[in-house]
Image: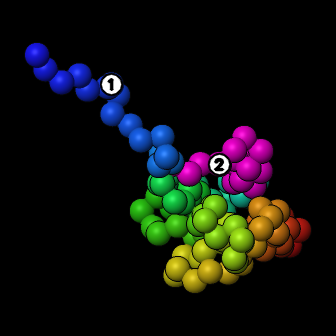
Amino acid sequence: MGTVTPWPLSDRSISQQTGFDRQELLRILDLYGRMVAAGKWRDYAMDFQRDVAIFSAFRRTSERPEYRIEKRPALRQRQGMWALVSEGGAVLKRGDELSNILAPVERKLMKLVGG
């Protein structure tokens, strides 16, 4: 007769993509909203790939992102899975906790609002 092929073709051993969980995304979007209210950021983008999830914050849509918040679970045991990357591509901060990674941006926000 013929060959029966199971549908859909998928391999469960390969993870489809890395993403942010609800609490992580809530924390990131809270900071984004405060930066928008301060007039610092105007747009954002999210990119989800197999090994990394990236949240990018833009001053203007036509520019490169001012900051990228990256989550790389494969680096959890080494450098920490979270990274804050500057506009030029330099890693500003790396660690295991999202709150520690967002701290430099939150300090910058305090200067914008307070001063």
The x and y percentages for residue 110 are 85, 68
Residue at the extreme right: 114
Rendered view: 35 above or below 4 = below
Between residue 59 and residue 101, name the one nearer to us: 101
Q: Nearer the viewer, mark 2 or mark 1?
A: 1
Which quarter of the figure has residue 113? bottom right
Between residue 62 and residue 97, name the one nearer to us: 97
Horizontally, residue 59 falls left or right of residue 102, namely: left
Which quarter of the figure has residue 32? bottom right
Mark 2 surroundings within 10 Å by alpha-carbon count, few (fewer than 14), some (14 through 19), many (20 or more): some
Between residue 79 and residue 94, name the one nearer to us: 79
Magenta segment, prevailing SS (helix, strand or loop): helix
Q: Determine which of the numbered discs, if any, sits on residue 20 in the image.
A: 2
Q: Magenta residues, as a range?
A: 17-33
Which residue does the numbered mark 1 point to in the structure image? 7
Residue shown at 35%/28% (left/top)?
8
Q: Amino acid at mark 2?
A: Phe
Residue shown at 23%/22% (left/top)?
4
Q: Amino acid at mark 1?
A: Trp
Q: Is residue 112 visible?
A: no
The x and y percentages for residue 31 are 75, 55
